[in-house]
Image (cartoon, rainbow, N blue to C red):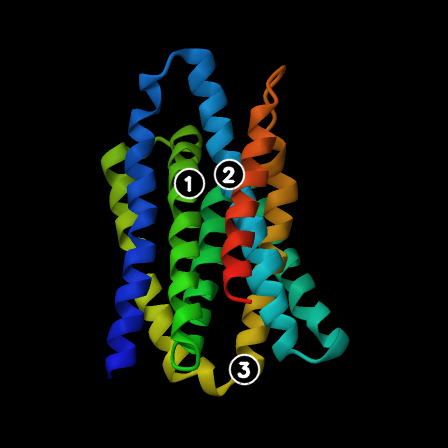
Amino acid sequence: MGAIVYATLLAALAGAAIPLGAWLARFDRILPGPLRNEANHWIMAFGAGALLSAVALVLIPEGIDRVPGLLALLPLLAGAIAALVSDIAMAHRGGSKAQFMAMLMDFIPEAIAMGAILTADPGLAVLLAILIGAQNLPEGFNADRELAASSKTPRSKRLLLFLALVPAGPLAAVLGITMFSGWPELLGVLMLFSAGGILYLMFQDIAPQVPVERHWSPPLGAIMGFAFGLGGHILTL
């Protein structure tokens, strides 16, 4: 019971970064136009780098440790195809929610993984919770701006939507402890599926929005986001 409470608390704190990032998006107009545009792209790039670090350092390495051989390619490709189908469906409805989808495909499987490894390696679980929170903050910021641009939903309702996502983390962490810790193959499949979906969304929707004409700092933001995740990974070696 103690491990479940601990996992629930860690996942809730990491998930709280989502509505916090969405709330911070309301202040992006404080900056003057050109500077605001570059800052928004920089935050988007940092989130993309953090997502890439999640894929490269957590989801794929942990996934292939649990799914044998070339079978690991199947859930990876399945995740990419699922994201492609969802992207097409949303485009037909007149909107894009790539940041929102990528956030969910990152947050939930990582919360499950955190719960699954908590009893075996509490230190790694805590570090993973910190990385999840660090990814969720810019992702919440970017997802709120994306929803604002693609829908007429009021800011207050969008914030309630992001708040409603927070309990998904604790639920996923409890699933990780109670079910996935004893079924490593299923955990590996889920992580690889999520990695495939995130990679598709990054190359199709997120990365093309990062460049700003005659500005070179947003790509540096992506590197810094990846470096943040890499630093955490190095500390666990």
Label 3 belongs to which residue?
184
Label 2 belongs to which residue?
46
Mark 1 crowd level (few <14, some 14–19, many ≥20, 10 Å Cα): many
In percent of width and height, residue 167 lies at 28, 61
Amino acid under disc 1: Pro
Give the number of marks. Answer: 3
Query: Mark 2 vs mark 3: which is more N-terminal?
Result: 2
- Marks 2, 3: nearer the viewer: 2
The residue positioned 65% from the left and 56% from the top of the image is: 80
Label 1 belongs to which residue?
138
The residue positioned 49% from the left and 43% from the top of the image is: 99
In percent of width and height, residue 233 lies at 53, 60
Q: Are marks 2 and 1 in contact (CB under 8 Å)?
A: yes
Q: CA distance from mark 1 to mark 3?
A: 30 Å
Q: Quadrant of residue 15?
A: bottom left
Image quadrant containing the C terminus: bottom right
Q: Residue 90, which numbered label? A: none
Is residue 102 shown above or below 58? above
Amino acid under disc 3: Pro
In percent of width and height, residue 105 lies at 49, 57
In percent of width and height, residue 72 lies at 69, 72
> Relative to 178, is 63 on the left or the right?
right
